[in-house]
Image (cartoon, helix red, strand yellow):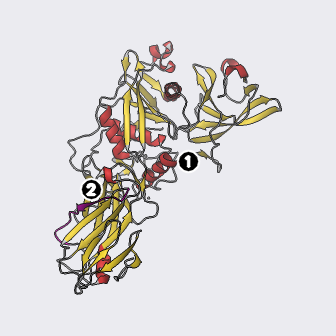
Amino acid sequence: MQGRVLGVALTLLLSSCGGSSGGGSAVQNKGVVQVSTTVASDGQSRQINATCPFSQKLGPARTDNMRIDRVSWVQTVELDASAGNTLLIAGKPVLARIDLLASSLPASPDSAYLLVSNAAATSCTRINLAGPGSVPASRDPQTLNTAYSASIPANLVQPGASISVVFDDADGRTASQVDNLYRVYELPVHSALSESIRVIPITYKGFSGSVSNNADLAALLTRLHPVTSFTLKTEASFAPPSLSQSVLDVLNNGSETFETMQAVLSELDDECAKRNGAQSSARTAPKCLGVFPANLTFRSGTGSVVGLAYVGGVSMLTQSVSATDTFSVISPYNSSHWLDFRALTVAHEYGHLLNLNHAACGGPTDTDPRLYSDGRLGGGAGYDSARSFYFSSQRLSNDGQPQFGDLMSYCAKEWSSDRGYLAALGYRGAGSARITASASEAPAPSHWLKVSQQQGQWQLRPVSFAPATLRITDKVMQAQTALGMVPLPVYAAVIADAPEATQGPYFVDLGDLVPQQLQLSVLPLANGLTSKIWSAGEWTIH
C-alpha cells in the first residue's frame, strides 16, 4: 500500500584543477568556478581573486602531501560538491563537510575556514571550520570526527551565492601545493519552495483524528524533504461518506477494509479540491492531510494500513500524530529510530505526493526505478539538523545488514536517500509527469474529468488537474461530439502496492473537446448496468 502496513509479527512501511600561481593568470580551480591568482611583490603570499578574495602563504616545499580530497554539501542528505547533479534548496542551512587528507602525520593547517558570499555578492561571511587534531590519511564516511565541518546559515544558502574553502599554513607551501588547499564553488541552489498542508481531521463514530503539534510536524517534514518551509493548519473535520454507512457502523466495530480506505482517500481528495478551489497542478496546489482517529483501523490481509496517498497527487491519509521525535534515542546508530513512527508515516506519504513511488526494500511490488535498487541509501550519508545526527549508510547493524532504508521503503530506520531527495526536488521545483506502463508523457493539463464511485454510484466531476503520475488502463470513455464518437483513454490514479481500485478514481483528459455526452461502458457499474451516460448538462468545462 501507499503507506505503512502493521503486520502481526513485524512492521512494514507501506506507505545525486588547481591553477598555477602567477600575476593575474586565469585558472580553473578544482571546484567549479574560474578564478585568478595574484602573487605579492615579495613572493611570500598570493591572493585568490574569487568573489570573496583570500590569500595563502607561499613558502618552502612540504612533504606531508596535504590536500583537499572531497567537499560535500549536507542538507538532509550528503551531496558531492563537484557532482553535476548536486542541488540544494534555498533557505535551509547546509553542513559543509571537507575531507582534508595528508600522507604523513602529524600535520594540521594553521587556519581553516569558509568564505560565503551573499547572492548579490555585496558581502562575504567568514565561517571557521572545526576539524580533527591532526589530518587523517584517509576518509572515514561514517563520522564527521575525521573531517573539517561547519554549518552555513540558512540566510546565506541562496541562488547566486558562492563559497570558498580555504586552508593555510603560517610557514607557507609552494604554489603547486597550496593549489591543493583551496576550492571555489558557486553553490548550486534552487530557489526557495514552500508548501501548505491542510490538516483535516477524519471523524468516525464520534471521534476525530488530530495532529498534536502542527509546528513540530512541519519542522519534521522540512528536515526530511527538499522544501524550504511547511505551513500546516488544522481545518474543519470531515466525515467521509464511506464511513457513515449504517451497515459498516454496525458490523465492523472500528475495523474497515482496505477498499474502504481507498474510498475514503478518494472522498478526501474531493473534499480537498473543494477547499482548494481552482489550482493549476498537483505539484503546486496546497496538500491535504486527512488524519483518522484511534478508534478506526483499516486492514489488509493480516495487518493494518496506517497511511495512503496518490503518487503525484495532493491528498494523503494517515493515523493521528501525537509526537515527532523519540528523545530517548541519543544516537542515529541506536537500534531504534529517533523519529516517531506515525510522524514518519506522514513524511513517507508526503514523499508520494512528491511523485516518488516505493523504494525496493521490504517487499513492495511497485518500485521507483530512480531510487537505489536495494531500497537503501546507496552508501551515502544523512544529516538530521534538528538532532545534529550525522550518519552513514555504510554503518552496518550487529547482524551485518545496512541500518538505514530509504524513506520510501518498507525497511526500518528510514531517511531520505540522495536519489530520492534530488528526484523530489526536481519534481517540486520544475515538475514532471509520467504514465506508468507507458513510454508516453502524461497529457498536458487541460480539461480533466475525475470518475469515481460514491456509495455504489459512479460520479463524474470536472477537476483542475490530475495527479502527476497516472497508470494507463484498458478502459475507454466514448465522447459524443459534433464530429461523432471519440474514444478517450482512461487513466487510474496510482497507489503503490495496490491493485487498480475498482471504485476509481479514474481520470479522463478531454483536451479541447466539448462533448455533448460521455459514455462509460467498461467499468463495473451499479444495479446491473453495463454503461452509464452523462449529458453535457451534468458537468461544466471551465
* Residue 190 drawn at (x, y percent): 43, 52
* Residue 509 drawn at (x, y percent): 67, 36
- Residue assigned mark 2: 151
Q: Is residue 357 visible?
A: no
Contact between marks 2 and 1 (CB within 8 A): the answer is no
Q: CA distance from mark 2 to mark 1?
A: 32 Å
The tag on residue 432 is 1
Does 534 lie within the magenta span? no
Quadrant housing the C terminus: top right
* Residue 58 drawn at (x, y percent): 24, 82
Give the residue displayed 43% in from the left and 59% down from the top.
Answer: 86
- Answer with left or right where residue 445 lies relative to residue 107: right
The tag on residue 384 is none
> Which of the marked residues, 2 or 1, is nearer the chain's N terminus?
2
User: Against 439, is 348 above or below?
Assistant: above
* Residue 178 drawn at (x, y percent): 29, 78
- Looking at the picture, which amino acid does disc 2 mark? Ser
- Magenta part of the chain: 120-134
> Quarter of the image holding residue 18?
bottom left
Q: Secondary structure at mark 1?
A: loop
Give the residue displayed 38% in from the left and 56% down from the top.
Answer: 120
Give the residue displayed 46% in from the left and 46% down from the top.
Answer: 363
